[in-house]
Every structure is written in C-alpha cells, then in structure tokens.
C-alpha cells in the first residue's frame, strides 16, 4: 500500500489498496458535501468560496472558509514530518501514525456529529460545521500526504484534478511513443491505474452518498475504518522499507 509507483508493476493487492483509498476519498468528500454543502477533500472549492464571500461582502465567512484548507496543508505537513523526514535520515517512516491520525479525525467527526456538535446533518451553518470541516480536511491531508509521499509523488487519493491532468498527458504520450519501446508499456499501465483510481473515487462518492443519506454523520465511521485498516498495513510497511 505504501511503496508502489507508476514506473513499477504493482501486484493486484497494491492496486486494490490504492483504489480502496481513492474510494474512501470519494466517500469523505460526498459526506462532507451532504453534511455542510462544501467539498472537503480538495482545496479548490474553499478558494472559490473565499472569492465569492469576499465579493458578496461576507468578510467573516470569507476568513473562516479560507482558514479551513490550512488544515489540509497541516495534514500533509504532518505526513511529511512523519514519513519523508525519517526516510531522509534513514529511519523508519511512520505510515501507521499518519493513517491512525486520519482515522481518529474521521471517528471524531462521526461522534461529534452524533452528539449534534455540528448541527443537524445537512442543515448546519459554517459556524456550526467549522470543526467538522477542520477534521475532514485534516484527515484528507494526512491520507493524501501519506500516499503521495510513499509513492514517489505519483499517487493521489483524495482528489482528481492532478490525476485527470496526468491521464490527459498520459493518453497523449501513448499516441506519441513507439509501441515497441518499454516506455509505452509503462505509460499504458499508468493510464489504466489512473482511470481505475478516478472510477474508484466516483464509485466511493456514490456509495458514500447512499450511506450518509441513510445514517448521517455515522457514515464517517466507514471511512475511518478504512483509514484504520491502512494504518495497520502501514505498521508492517514501515519495517519493510526501513530494512
């Protein structure tokens, strides 16, 4: 789960884990949108909302919404400190800690929602749902940082913009490269993986929407369990990579 790259031939188990985390990213984004009316697994939406709020003279809301994606950044920063930094110094990377923190954020989101700290599911305002947005952005930043770092910056699991761009470029390369050269086969394989990840995210969004419409905030437990599963695998991977 934590040591695959596009330029390698991953086994089916690695591919499944990658798609599973993309699926979970779709679930989180779907749940965040249904709960708060805002997408949470990428920064673009918050930047757009900030611009809209500024131009409609909602300064307090603009400042509030601008601060939320900083927690996505914080999650990625923590992942860098716990994964990239130890690897650079020849120590064991803490994949399990990072994904464990992501799972904790999602479990806190579920429990806080059930205790009505974030308001009624689907009807909460920014002031009520602010902490929920923080937890979800932090969880996504941690997960995306962990996978991006451990995959040599070739894999994203919480948003599709970069993958879609890579897919477009990859399709162009397939039309350009000589079919008999090794680079062609690698690019074809990478494109299949990119398409699979995009489809997994979309499928996760659909399944997540169904779950959240049924159980409300408790739906975050589902993605929390996936993150906990990844943390368990991360504990095994840290010893393999360290040696």
Image: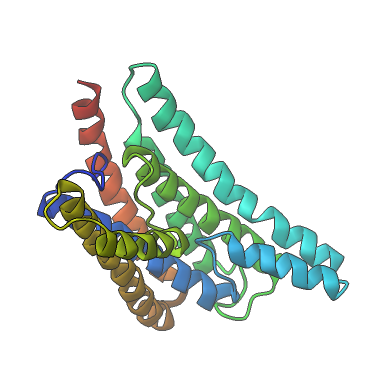
Q: Is residue 42 left or right of residue 51?
A: left
The quarter in which the C terminus is drawn is top left
Viewer-proximal residue, 171 or 239? 171
Say whether residue 168 is visible.
yes
Location of residue 29 with respect to 144 vertically, above or below: below
The quarter in which the N terminus is drawn is top left
Viewer-proximal residue, 109 or 203? 203
Image-quadrant location for residue 117: bottom right
Location of residue 109 with respect to 49 vertically, above or below: above
The percent position of residue 205, horizontal first and vertical second, equals 38, 74
Say whether residue 197 is visible.
no
Image-quadrant location for residue 131: bottom right
Question: Going 18% across and 50% down the picture, which residue do you hit?
Answer: 14
Question: Going 83% across and 68% down the picture, which residue do you hit?
Answer: 54
Question: Going 25% across and 61% down the picture, which residue do you hit?
Answer: 174
Image-quadrant location for residue 65: bottom right
Location of residue 232 with respect to 163 vertically, above or below: above
Q: Is residue 218 left or right of residue 69?
A: left
The percent position of residue 81, horizontal first and vertical second, equals 48, 29
Q: Is residue 163 left or right of residue 53?
A: left
Count the marks. Answer: 0
The percent position of residue 113, horizontal first and vertical second, equals 53, 67
Viewer-proximal residue, 69 or 138? 69
Q: Is residue 229 left or right of residue 93?
A: left
Q: What colouring method underlies this structural image? A: rainbow
């Amino acid at each position: 789960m934590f040591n695959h790259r596009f330029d390698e031939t991953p086994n089916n188990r690695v591919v499944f884990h990658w798609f599973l985390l993309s699926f979970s990213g779709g679930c989180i984004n779907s749940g965040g949108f249904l709960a708060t009316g805002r997408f949470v697994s990428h920064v673009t939406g918050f930047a757009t909302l900030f611009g809209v709020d500024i131009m409609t003279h909602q300064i307090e809301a603009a400042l509030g919404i601008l601060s939320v994606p900083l927690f996505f950044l914080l999650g990625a920063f923590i992942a860098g400190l716990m994964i990239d930094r130890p690897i650079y110094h020849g120590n064991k990377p803490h994949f399990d800690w990072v994904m464990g923190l992501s799972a904790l954020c999602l479990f806190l989101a579920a429990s806080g929602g059930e205790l009505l700290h974030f308001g009624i599911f689907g009807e909460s305002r920014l002031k009520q749902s602010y902490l929920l947005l923080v937890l979800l952005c932090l969880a996504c930043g941690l997960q995306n940082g962990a996978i991006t770092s451990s995959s040599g910056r070739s894999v994203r699991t919480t948003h599709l913009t970069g993958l879609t761009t890579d897919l477009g470029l990859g399709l162009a390369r397939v039309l350009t490269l000589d079919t008999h050269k090794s680079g062609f086969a690698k690019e074809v394989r990478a494109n299949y993986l990119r398409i699979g990840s995009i489809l997994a995210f979309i499928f996760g969004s659909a399944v997540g929407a169904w779950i959240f419409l049924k159980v409300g905030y408790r739906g975050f437990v589902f993605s929390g369990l996936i993150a906990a599963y990844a943390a368990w695998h991360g504990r095994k991977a840290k010893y393999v990579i360290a040696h």
